[in-house]
Image (tube, rainbow, N blue to C red):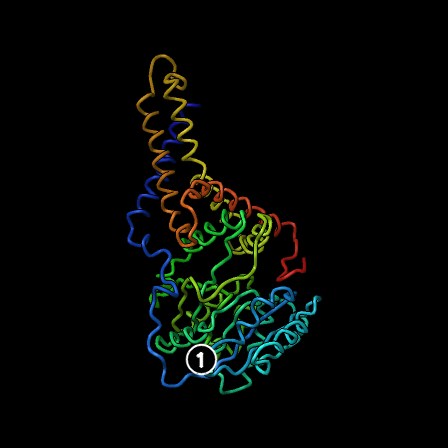
Amino acid sequence: MMLCFFWIVLSLAALVFVGYMVMWCSAARRRLFLPTDVSEHGGHDPAYWPPVAIVVPARNEADTLEHTLPTWLAQDYPNLKKVLLVDDRSDDLTGARALELSAKTNRPELLEVLTNAPLPKKWAGKVWAMNNGLEAVLQDESIEYVLLTDADIAHKPDSLRKLVRQSENKQLGFNSRMARLQCESFAEKWLIPPFLYFFLLLYPLRKANDPRCRMASGAGGCVLLSREAIRRLGGGLHEIKDCIIDDVNLAKAVKRNGLPIHLSLSVHTVKSTRPYPRVRDIAKMVNRSAYCQLNYNPLLLSLTLLVMGIVFIVPTIAIILGSYSMKHPHAFTGEARSLWLWSSFLTELGLAALILQMAHFKQALDFFNLNPWRMFTFPLAGLAYATMTLQSALRHWTRKKTTWREKE
């Protein structure tokens, strides 16, 4: 029995090693964190800057707006018509706080606050708020683009200009920037780089941006939609009305309706101001959508947990088991046979797989300008995300309600 276990561990370690070796040798490895708002050129300024409105769905965001709302009103875009904050029945005076802050800016007349209607059945809360915001601003027939941004997202003054320039040059229906997440606390430095790394493995940017590929992806914190894209979606967001993961599904819907989409990583232009000081804060974010990402399928959940277990546990087990077997070469076979050479191979295989795994992840640390030694925490981060994925499924099975934004 123990000998069988030895060979199973060796086979799985070899599988992990080969998988990471293929990833390491792939040209895609060097493009995993591309494009960014620094690496790509948005093209030339259009002869005419089309009218744009900004829509911000918000629920219980009064404390966040101080850091973000002034950045929306400070956009240097030549033809910004309106900033509409859709207050989704907040109980912390989000709408009043928004008006108070706008009064201190140079362009208070741009901001309007819309109190959202009660949530109907079969609609996700955030999607309902975005839909009503879109319908409100598009009553102005001159509006050609709408920027959907979250209440916790701050924009540099040239953010909207860059998005529109790129959309005009490439005729995009959907143009998204993945906001740069905060990476200051212990929890953030440990778990945010793996979060982005896993996302980019699931949704490679080069494939999402390829019109010939069915894959699509987006980042809901910053999405520029063209009027044509909204028209093809039926004038609103009914196609994705029940989607918890609204950004990816919105990108899929736009691409499915025949318009090009684009997603890039933001280095400087778009930034999240929401902190995650504790591991539990990140876990809440993952719990909300992880099982939804697996289509609420127990089989996919089981396969995901199995793969994550193999990838993040087996290399370490291989090193421990191989080292032990080298010191005790007859432990699994008796005196008649020695596994010393195979044990040495198993140890080196596990070590090689672990090194490749951490080296491949290092590019995520480089993106956040973090110390390379943090790559040694990556296997534990992988197991932490596996646990969060299981928690997400348990949350669904116990029918715990998934809400958009709860007041802490």
**Spot occupied by residue 293 in the image (x, y as percentages of width and height):** 51, 56
Image quadrant assignment for residue 10: top left
Q: Within 10 angstroms of label 1, few (less than 14), some, or many (20 or more) residues?
A: some
User: Could you say where residue 98 lies in the image, as x and y percent from the top left?
Assistant: 63, 73
Residue labelled with disc 1: 228
Residue closest to the eye, 101 or 367: 101
Q: Give left or right: position of 22 versus 303.
A: left
* Numbered disc total: 1
In terms of image quadrants, where is residue 33? bottom left
Image quarter (top left, top right, bottom left or bottom right) of the N terminus: top left
Q: Would residue 303 appear left or right of 36 to someone viewing this image?
A: right
Furthest-bottom residue in this view: 141
Q: How far from the left and from the top, in percent, is residue 83?
A: 56, 78
Q: Residue furthest top?
A: 335
Q: Position of residue 189 (x, y in %)?
A: 49, 49
In the rendered image, which quarter contains the C terminus? bottom right
Nearer to us in this view, 49 or 350: 49
Q: Is residue 333 above or below residue 212?
A: above
Q: Which type of secondary structure does the marked residue at label 1 adopt? A: helix
Q: Label 1 is placed on what type of residue?
A: Glu
User: Residue, x 41% and y 51% (percent of image)?
Assistant: 364
At x 38%, y 50%, the residue is 363
